[in-house]
Amino acid sequence: MMTRPRPMTPADADAAYAAAQCVVEIHRRLADQLRVGQTLAQIDAMVARWLGELRCESCFFKYRQGRLPPFPSQACLSVNECVVHGTAGYYEAPMKEGDILKVDIGVLHRGWIGDAAWTYTFKAFPSDEARRLIESGKQSLIRGIQQLRPGNTYLAWAEVVQDTVEKEFGFHLIRGLGGHGYYRRKLHEPPFISNVRPTDLAFRRTSMEWPDASTPCHVGAVVAVEPMVAIGTSETRSHPHQWPVYSADRSLTVHYEHDVMITESGPRVLTEGLEELPDIVG
């Protein structure tokens, strides 16, 4: 079924941008304050403090999904082989040189959602391969966003992202996870935005594997797009009734996410400014 965006007024667009920029501001503060020796609990506490200062609430805290318990943290904090949904308590060791931390921040600000993730490395890249992994995530995000324009479908996004990560860099996009639409007070709305082509699209007009692949990029849609990349596998593992998701082979992962509004002239990145953040912190 075709997914159409809800109506967006100019005031809505301004409010969506303001919420997204709150996420950017918290990432800026984090990039300045992250240090070797900090724990995830300490980092989450910083996020909580800044959320309050910016008059935001975390839209992740106490979030419910399926049979999982309410999400217990202000932000998703995922270390090394953890792809997404890391909690402040799942990993207790202090951050050390070479650790790769994915920080996903979701806010509710004056009735609108902002949701974006970025990846940070403490002190130094653990390897040249890890440096290339980070570059693959950023480049796929930047290039894919250019396809989010009227006249394209969301399949155009996936084709560019997948070709960048898997053909150009030789890494693996995580299957089964992807981006999403959102709206006022609604963190997850249609469409689901896969980062890879559906395998059955060549045989069907509409993919049974990813029905939203053929959904047009309608003017007014606001979407959170987010490549998740692993060095060695596209598969994941997780524990029943626990949030964190890991690469199946325990290889390093990265996660990048922007909020984008589709306009008549093309994509408008609401979380603009994230690209200015450093890769290396601490």
Image (tube, grey):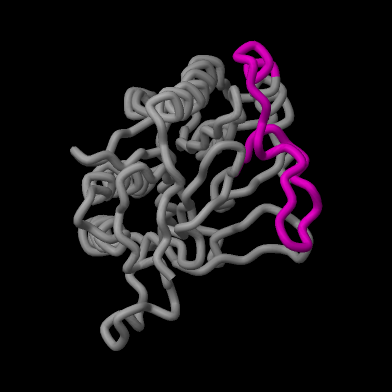
| Residue at the spot 43% in from the left edge and 24% down from the top edge | 11
Is there any visible trace of residue 9 in the rendered image?
Answer: yes
Picture coordinates of residue 49, whole percent (x, y): 69, 16
Q: Give the percent coordinates (x, y) of residue 239.
A: 73, 63
Q: Of all residues shown, which one is farthest toward the bottom?
A: 203
- Residue 46: image quadrant is top right
Res 79 quadrant in image: top right
- Is 272 placed above or below 5 here? above
- Rendered residue at 42%/45% (across/down): 223
Nearer to the camera, 115 or 92: 115
Is residue 2 toward the left or the right of residue 219 in the image? right
Q: What predominant SS class does the magenta segment belong to?
A: loop
Q: How many marks?
A: 0
- Report the side of 157 relative to 45 (left or right): left
Q: Nearer the viewer, residue 186 or 135?
A: 186
Residue 200, position as x, y percentages in the image: 35, 83
Q: Magenta stretch?
A: 49-78
Q: Is residue 59 magenta?
A: yes
